[in-house]
Amino acid sequence: MHVIYGGTFDPIHHGHLRLAVELRERLGVPEVSLMPCHVPPHREVPGATSEQRVALLELAIADEPGLTLDQRELGRGGASYTAETLRQVRAELGPDQPLTMVLGTDSFAGFDRWQEWQRIPELAHIVVVQRPGPGLEPGSAPARLLEERSVSGVEALYGAPCGHILELDPPLLDISATGIRDRILSGRSPRYLLPDSVWWEIRRQGLYGA
């Protein structure tokens, strides 16, 4: 099974990395592919360029062979649309290999605003990671989609190439990229919230006001 964990990673931090390791272990896969978004269509423009965020990601996962980097969205112009990315990955994997993408409940709550959102389950499974917050609005399109496609165990993801939604509630580190950026901008240290190599590079490049 091929697992994609996408995001802006602006910057990559221990919360991202720990979740990626949890996903690898919970899903029983040899690796999880971190896929940085080039231009996020549903949120503010990242504080660092795509190239800078990739450099930080490479430093962060350098000693963890179970985490890999997929830069395919950075090579496309314009906004990074998930359906387009999944079609490309599916073409590479073939029609039969299970493909899984990872979302937080906060992102999944607005899933019906994504481009071609109804096509996405026809291309990949979805793992929804529980995050603090109000959750899904009852009767909403994402809530109905979850009800229709929900499965209770990881085994179901291996039994089909796409189409299922699995909810996971792994332990999460309460770290946010926004909080890290704000901390750096105000002159406070973010050390131990992200890898030392990443913090060193942020300071070297003067990112986020460092």
Image (tube, rainbow, N blue to C red):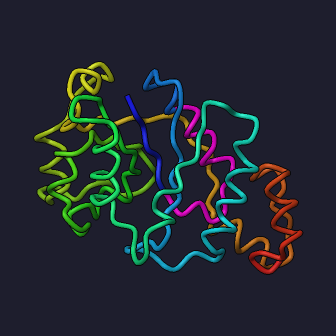
Tell me: 85 left or right of 164. Answer: right
Please tell me how many numbered marks the rendered image carries: 0
What residue sits 36% from the left and 44% below the top? Answer: 101
Residue 18 on the magenta span: yes
Pick the residue in front: 94 or 45: 94
What residue sits 50% from the left and 58% below the top? Answer: 7
| Snapshot quadrant of residue 188 | bottom right
Span shown in magenta: 7-22
Residue 93 on the magenta span: no
Tell me: 106 left or right of 48. Answer: left
Q: Position of residue 123 (x, y in %)?
A: 22, 45
Q: Position of residue 30 (x, y in %)?
A: 52, 24
Pick the residue in front: 106 or 199: 199
Q: Position of residue 66 (x, y in %)?
A: 61, 30
Q: Is residue 93 above or below residue 47?
A: above
Q: Is residue 3 above or below residue 189?
A: above
Pick the residue in front: 156 or 52: 52
Tell me: 144 left or right of 155. Answer: left
What residue sits 19% from the left and 44% below the top? Answer: 146
Q: Is residue 73 above or below residue 206?
A: above
| Snapshot quadrant of residue 64 | top right
Quarter of the picture holding the C terminus = bottom right
Quarter of the picture holding the N terminus = top left
Q: Is residue 28 above or below residue 16?
A: above
What residue sits 86% from the left and 76% below the top? Answer: 187
Q: Position of residue 148 (x, y in %)?
A: 10, 41
Tell me: 100 left or right of 40. Answer: left
